[in-house]
Amino acid sequence: MSSEDEDRQILSLDCLAHFNMELYYFSEILDSFSSDSPQLDHTTVNYLVKIVKIVDRLLHRQEVEKVYGSAPLVVKDFENVTLQRTFLCESCKAVIPFLWTDFQEHLEECGQGAVGGKKIKAKGNPRAKLSEQQSLVGGSKAPNEAVKLQRLPLFRESPSNHLNEPSSKKPVVDSVLKEAKMKEIKKEIKEIKHEFKKELKECKKELKECNKERKEIKKMAKEGEKKDAKKAKKTFALQKRPIWLLNNVEETIYQNMAIGEKIINLTVYKTISEDLEKILSKEFPEVKVYVFGSRKTGLSTDLGDLDLFVDVNNYYNAPLKNKEKVVNIIEKVRECLSPSNSEWSKLVPIMNARTPILKAFNMAYKIPCDLSFTSGLSHINTSLIRYLLTLQPDCHRVACFVKAWYKSIFVSTYESNKLSSYMITILVVFFMQTINLLPPIFYLQNTVEKPLMIGHWQGDFKKPTLSELNLLMSNDPKLILTGFFHFYSTFDFKNLVVCPLLGKPIERKLFETPELLPQEMARYKEFVKQLPPVPESAKDLLVTDTVMCVQDPLELCHNLAKGIHEDMYEKFTSLCAKSLAVLLQK
């Protein structure tokens, strides 16, 4: 045999030995699974399928030369180089060699069912099988040929095919290499599973966020549709009472002014105040009672409450901010007025209001009263409103009409509690400031040499005449009413604040940065600086995130329209427009 033929035979036999090793792995893997074991994972199934394909190619198609080299392979060569392993047949307890023909013959003798699956177990050490293989491959020349095999290049294929890797210097059937390979595969599978779970988790998280966002968008769209539908259905129409008022402006003004002026200086106010001071002096020796509110401005009717500020301990100039103390005072006053011989009844404390009060009824004069205890600023406000109404008589006339008009529109108890007559009066004052019929409040305060401070706010003001203010007197209340309804039906409440201190609108966004407010707002800016830098202080600032913002002319941190909701705002502006149309028709 020539050297070239010898090398070709050695190459062919080496390839057969390598193939036989793969068959050995195949049998070992099958042997490791019992009938009650979990099913093979995807990677193992693919591995076994590849082996089966190679077996089919070698035994039936004889195409091994395309994979391993130029030497063709036949079934006889495959049988000659098969490893000499033995198996124990658990059916007949016979030890049989693992040659292809012997194995097939034994299967036929014992029967397929008796030796299938787990009942055939391998015997012997895989490392010992290598020497048997080398003996079969080359007989007495096996050692020399094994050396040659180590020098000969084997087949090459893509790196992804782990079945066709080059031979190493050590025997490829070494069980240590087999175990290492299996561990490596398991490790890769574990890493792939870990990455897959991680990606799956991220995908689930993203999906959850997407679903959440989708639900929010759907919810917002649904709410928007409901809101639009509600607006479309909502129509505000003037009822008979406000229409009658608009058709009888002069008569309405005359009647309401007559009532207001009649009750503005009733002697009963002084009597009630003195009686109250006498009862409470036992508990509060320095008590002093002040009358304020619409009954003292001339804008009240005979059904209006009598507002009383009860100064139990010199709180007129030093406002009592501790709510617990106010509650304690109200309880003590209630106890003082409770005896059966007292002329006071229906004592109802209102603790949740911005300014806690005690409602009471004076049985002697049949007058309901509201008792407050916080500061004298409300008393000062009454004095300011009374001055402005007398300074410009048309302001008094228009305020009387607008008060009757708004009470005929907002008839429910809920609405009347949210929209105070004091706020309506401020809206009238502010409109007349914008048309130069009343002065800005800042001008009245700025001329005071020694301001009277009520807490953080200036309480006193000068009372100049119209000629001193260089203002004209108006004598056309109906024309002013027309302007009033037009002004507030188109006023940009969304972006502007009604500011009687300046006598003109001011942008809401300026209150977000108080330093940008005009110099006339110096007391408010100083008030903001003195607040502690904690979130709780935000409640003391002027609330500007409401549908309407009407700043109190003296207590600059108070939004008089804070309680007005969207429906009331729409109703007010809509009916202002409709009322304007009625006035223009005449």
Image (cartoon, helix red, strand yellow):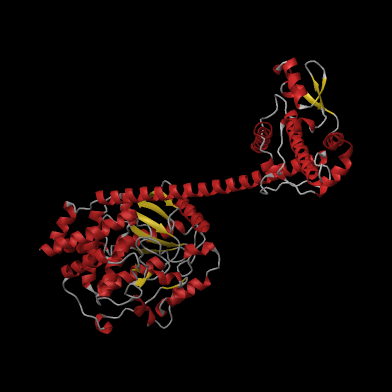
> Which quarter of the figure has residue 74?
top right
* Quarter in which the C terminus is drawn: bottom left
* Image location of residue 315, percent across then percent down: 47, 66
Question: How many numbered marks are there?
Answer: 0
* Image location of residue 391, percent across then percent down: 26, 75
For the residue pair 6 and 227, the one nearer the viewer reads as 6
For the residue pair 22 and 313, the one nearer the viewer reads as 22
For the residue pair 167 and 468, the one nearer the viewer reads as 167
Residue in the picture at 81% in, 46% down: 3
> Which quarter of the figure has residue 423?
bottom left
* Quarter in which the N terminus is drawn: top right
> Which quarter of the figure has residue 83?
top right
- Left or right of 214 in this view: 574: left
Spot the residue most to the front: 1
- Left or right of 236 in this view: 209: right
* Image location of residue 147, percent across then percent down: 86, 46
Rendered position, 463 above or below 354: below
Residue in the picture at 16% in, 70% down: 479
- Residue 563 in view in this figure: yes
* Image location of residue 308, percent across then percent down: 38, 60
Spot the residue most to the left: 586
- Left or right of 427 in this view: 544: right
For the residue pair 374 and 311, the one nearer the viewer reads as 374
Residue in the picture at 82% in, 38% down: 175
Rendered position, 498 above or below 246: below
- Residue 320 in view in this figure: no
